[in-house]
Image (spheres, grey):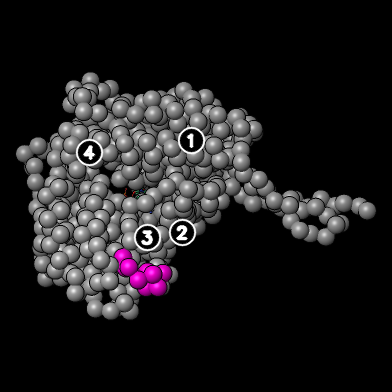
Amino acid sequence: MANIDWRARAADLRIDGRAFIAGQRVAAKSGETFDCISPLDGRVLGPVARGRAEDIDAAVACARAAFDDGRWAHKPPAQRKKILQRFAEKILAAKEELALLETLDMGKPVQYSLNVDVAAAARTIAWYGEAIDKVYDEIAPTARSGLALITREPMGVIGAVVPWNYPMIMAAWKLGPALATGNSVVLKPSEKSPLTALRLAEIAIEAGLPDGVFNVVPGHGAEAGEALALHMDVDAIGFTGSTRTGRRMLEYAGRSNLKRVYNELGGKSAFVVFDDFADVQRAAKTVAGSMFFNQGESCNAPSRVFVHERIADEFVAIVKNETPKYRPGDPLSGSAEMGAIVDDIQLRAVLGYIDAGHAEGARLVAGGKRVMAETGGYFVEPTVFDGVRNDMKIAREEIFGPVMSILRFKTEEEAVRLANDSSYGLEASVWSDNINRAHRVARSLRAGMVHVNQYDEDDITVPFGGYKQSGNGRDKSLHAFDKYTELKTTWIRIDE
Ligand code: NAD
């Protein structure tokens, strides 16, 4: 890692932004493209196919044909396993190229693209491949006159629509369970980060996935994304993105074929620290690390931090001291802890929230400004506001940038009430050395994932998803198989 000259590699990189349909790279039918811009310096990386409804139609038709003839769905699970394992190995073999593409495309530090994103994407694909020949169906405990088989069958054609913050991981969370169970997939990556998804499709075919089983159509949300979600021949949508678009996904299903919609949406996660937690330093360092990781562009970033008033000053001082560690730097240096915000639009949105924090009377403790503007890239300092109230815009809305809001509380009842007073419910954390309080509060927090005295643990073996307007589906773990399979009951009569 230390001796890789990422800048030199970037200069040599060949960017291919064409779509991937039926096992081949193809231009959009209209011939149109859009510019793929790097947030590192505002430079155009290359043209990307601007997929529209006619390209989605072609990809869905080809995914349907692949599903119907059973070239993938009818393979024994053990064979699908082998191919998915090979797919994962080939992702790792291409790890440096993929990491570089990810960083150039969406701005995160390259060592994280390499060690977190590529590694997690490969592990996800391998894990689902390894699992699929170990899952059994059921026989119901019925009367002797019949045998009721309860089986799971692949759904057919899955439309996957994913965001830009972890492009490869989000794609892998859909692809792993959808492909392992025998479905065909049409993936629509974010227009802000389409490059790694396109490479993943090529790598999958090299690994032995039959043509047409995995297709990628890049394009804008309101064009390619909408066409996929409205398509009459798509059986389910696996969506990760904003709550605003998730709402649309449900409408598209209602207006078309009532396809299943699994939404993994935004968050405004609460991090609650009680004064009976002795190691204030660890809690404060953890929240800084988790909040500023990935430039704060994480759905589960702990952006609402509730601290008991007795320890709040000490806590805020430690968080403030941590922020210089996360100052943005060159994402290709291999040593920057924070990289660039994905694009100019998101940069302006984040700065707008910082303005709103000032305007509503929150107290700026650290950061607050755009930096490194001379590079042409989109960098923002790690920013901390203290004295935030839960009704302020910066406490209610998902910022999706490196901005932390600290709120002070007096009692356990108040902390739980405030933490739950959010339209989101993705993740939460409680810090207490009192085992009763820790369990009590963990139970009371309305979130799909709750941590006690830590925030970093994560594993492919556990479900990921939220309550309330953070969505309905669950990515990861064996539970994700439920999203991409239909449950069938088959009754067989048995005569005595
Ligand atoms: P977004 O909703 O703008 O876009 C997500 C995807 O949807 C993109 O591919 C986009 O092109 C597409 N899209 C946009 N408008 C569309 C439309 N009208 N019809 C069809 N498709 C459309 O979200 P984003 O800005 O890319 O991502 C950030 C959001 O993702 C944040 O809210 C974040 O919390 C969320 N997220 C959630 C999870 C999770 O697991 N819960 C994980 C990562 C990100």
Disc nearer the start of the sequence (1/4): 4
Q: Residue at x 25, y 55 (%)?
A: 286
Q: Quadrant of residue 379?
A: top left
State the CA–CA distance, disc 1 to disc 4.
Answer: 25 Å
Mark 2 or mark 4, which is nearer to you?
A: 4
State the CA–CA distance, disc 3 to disc 4.
Answer: 26 Å
Read off the magenta span. 431-439
Q: Which residue is mark 1?
A: 126
Disc nearer the start of the sequence (2/3): 3
Q: Which residue is mark 3?
A: 451
Q: Quadrant of the N terminus?
A: top left
In the rendering, which numbered label is found on residue 109?
4
Q: Amino acid at mark 3?
A: His
Disc nearer the start of the sequence (1/2): 1
Secondary structure of the residue carrying tag 1 is: helix
Q: Residue at x 40, y 38 (%)?
A: 121
State the CA–CA distance, disc 2 to disc 3.
Answer: 20 Å
State the CA–CA distance, disc 1 to disc 2.
Answer: 25 Å
Secondary structure of the residue carrying tag 3 is: strand
Q: Amino acid at mark 4?
A: Pro
Instruction: Indicate the position of residue 488 as horizontal and vertical percent values.
Output: 68, 51
